[in-house]
Amino acid sequence: KAADRAAADERRAAAERAAERNAASLALIEEGHIPLAASERLASYGSATAGAGGEAFSSDLAVSEWSALARLGIRPVTQVMGSSVFHVGWQPTYYNVPTEVSVLSDAYNECRRLALGRLREEASACRADAVVGVRIEHGTHDWAAGAIEFIAVGTAVTLPAELAAPSRETVLSDLTGQEYALLCQAGMRPVGIAAQTSVHYVPASAQTQRAQSSMMASWANQELTDFSQGVYEAREKALASVTAQVRALGGDGIIGVQLGQSGRTHAVQRGFYESKDLEVTFHVMGTVIREDPSLAPAGPPATP
């Protein structure tokens, strides 16, 4: 019986410790950080590099990418990830004038910021200098209506001293291994990722309503100019923000820009007629670079 009581006490203590760790992890996530289990696992990598007898590395690098990076003395540490599931707040059903849907734009941008921030924190936890090949996936879930999710994944790497950022801050890049190596050899330094999403709502103009109406539709081909303009406005708003981020990072420009655009219509009753308004979403992301001629001669470490 004493043994049974001791076992029960141990189970209860273990459950309490697990609950405490879960609460601590939840508090960290609420502050924008990564949970305890992730930080503890990544800390075990320390300064281990491929072939150094430490932790075995993992990566999603292709052989050609690994080879290109290895020639510059860049070594993979481990795969890292950042994730955020974000609830989208209340928004009007429709607008009567073209406008940015700030509730949606802000939700996308904050969700992405949290995901990339946690990706960088995971890389810092294993003392990596950079993350290459960052890719972001976003979507929605049936089990969380009105929520969006961003997942950022990449390979954390260590850099030789001449390639590391002067600030020693972990640098994120969506460039492939070969692209990262070629950029450094050309005397350009990746300094971070710039990204922005803009969601615009475009109410159907009278012309577009007539084109949509089965009773008033014109038999001639015609451009829906208000919708075309809405796509341009969403793009310009996103690109303007990305340009500001490039300047804030001290970059000369941005390369490898990925553009994503999607649209959906909203049926709206206006007077006697039902029209279909357009909601267009524009995503922009790329790697910010800065000229640094000192990198150009950088090559593989000298062999004794």
Image (spheres, grey):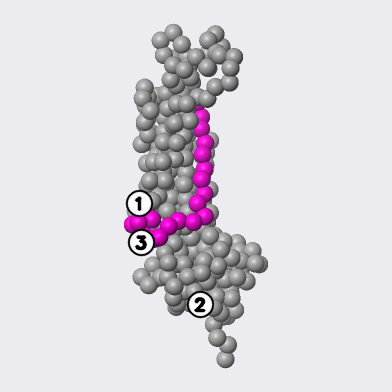
Q: Nearer the viewer, residue 118 or 229?
A: 229
Residue 244, disc: 1
Q: Please tell me whether residue 273 is drawn above or below residue 27 in the rendered image.
A: above
Residue shown at 36%/25% (left/top)?
A: 97
Q: Magenta includes 93? A: no
* Sequence order check, earlier mark of 2 and 3: 3
Q: Circle 2 is placed at which residue position?
A: 298
Q: Amino acid at mark 1?
A: Ala
Secondary structure of the residue carrying tag 3 is loop
* Sequence order check, earlier mark of 1 and 2: 1
- Determine the CA span between mark 3 and mark 1: 10 Å
Residue 184, disc: none
Q: Amino acid at mark 3?
A: Gly
Category of crowding for the residue at label 2, using alpha-carbon neighbours closer than 10 angstroms: few (below 14), some (14–19), many (at least 20) = some
Secondary structure of the residue carrying tag 2 is loop
Residue shown at 59%/76% (left/top)?
A: 71
Can residue 51 be seen here? The reply is yes
Category of crowding for the residue at label 3, using alpha-carbon neighbours closer than 10 angstroms: few (below 14), some (14–19), many (at least 20) = some
Q: Which portion, as a residue range, is magenta?
A: 244-267
Residue shown at 47%/70% (left/top)?
A: 187
Q: Identify the image quadrant of the C terminus.
A: bottom right
Q: Nearer the viewer, residue 143 or 281?
A: 281
The percent coordinates of residue 203 (x first, y second) are: 42, 23
Q: Please tell me whether residue 63 is drawn above or below residue 113 in the rendered image.
A: below
Residue 133: quarter of image: bottom right
Q: Circle 3 is placed at which residue position?
A: 250
Secondary structure of the residue carrying tag 1 is helix
